[in-house]
Amino acid sequence: MGEAFAIIYSEKKPKAVKAAKRALEILEKNGLRGVMMNAREAVEKKIPSDTDIVIALGGDGTILKAVNAISDDAAILGVNFGRGGYLMEIESDMLEESLEKVIGGEYGVEEAMMLYIKLNNGVIGEALNEAYISSNQPGNILNFKVIQDEVKLLEFPGDALITSTPIGSTAHAYSAGGPILDDRLNAIVLAPVCPLTDVRAIIVSISRPIKVEVLGGGEMQVLIDGWIRRSVKSEKAVLEVGRSERTVKFIKLTTERGFERRIKKRFGYED
């Protein structure tokens, strides 16, 4: 029967919808099994557990949703129909030739780490990019304390704290003044957002989990990868962030690492 495919597309991008239909036609022409669904449906219903390859058509948000809809063994080919496309392997005009390569087995796989996030001892999600910890009320200041192995790493009042993976370090953490990390590092970025004291982003090993204590009145929230949101009403919340046992597998069609591609996009470098 060959490999099983799933095509996940952004329903907000008409060109991605059209391309998804064309991709399904190519798969069926080659006698391969494929299902097609938009990103929202994929999150709600999940894709078949025996799926081997996911074709994600849209922007980075489509990838971040697809990650939560697939099995651990499936590999993702990202096709960029968005503005940034930092997580995407190819641009939209390369879809057909790239799909033929994938069907022919002419590809490699690159793995990316994920983080698990616990809130008050309960797991609330896993992040490929980042977790953004803030007040539910814009402008409200929270007090953050970050601890690892009983050693205080950061303590500050501010708007938010971003905990970012290497692959997410070119996203919001970078915009908040954080460094960009090579994907091969077993480390994360802790990036304060609008701190009221003189603290800056730091890099820490994630070989051991970190604990984040959040103090402040009202309701605080955790936003994972820009779409998973969890809130809690408490004077104090305690989060644990650690390296997940799960990784995300990205299909590679060139020898260029994903890290190199994201650097070029972020800094506007030309080939």
Image: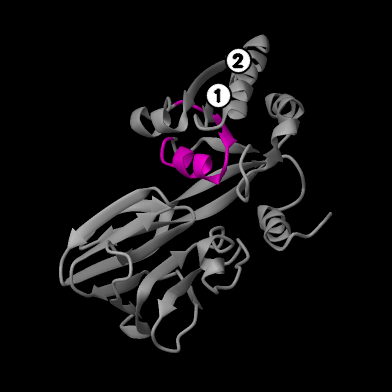
Number of the label disc, if any, that sits on residue 171: none
Q: Three-letter amino acid code at disc 2?
A: Leu
Q: Position of residue 179 (x, y in %)?
A: 59, 73
Going from N to C along the chain, the mark reached first, 1 or 2, is 1
Q: Are marks 1 and 2 in contact (CB under 8 Å)?
A: yes
Q: Is residue 188 magenta?
A: no
SS for callout 1:
strand
| Along the viewing direction, whichever of 184 and 155 lies nearer the viewer | 155
Q: Position of residue 70 (x, y in %)?
A: 44, 35
Report the residue marked by disc 1: 5
Dividing the picture into quadrants, the one containing residue 44 is top left
Rendered-image quadrant of the N terminus: top right
* Residue lying at the far front of the rendered structure: 139
Residue range in magenta is: 50-69
Q: Position of residue 85 (x, y in %)?
A: 63, 47
| Along the viewing direction, whichever of 209 and 136 lies nearer the viewer | 136
Report the residue marked by disc 2: 32
> Do we see residue 123 in this rendering?
no
Residue 124 horizontal side relative to residue 90, left or right:
left
Q: Residues within 10 Å of mark 1 (few under 14, many from 20)?
A: many
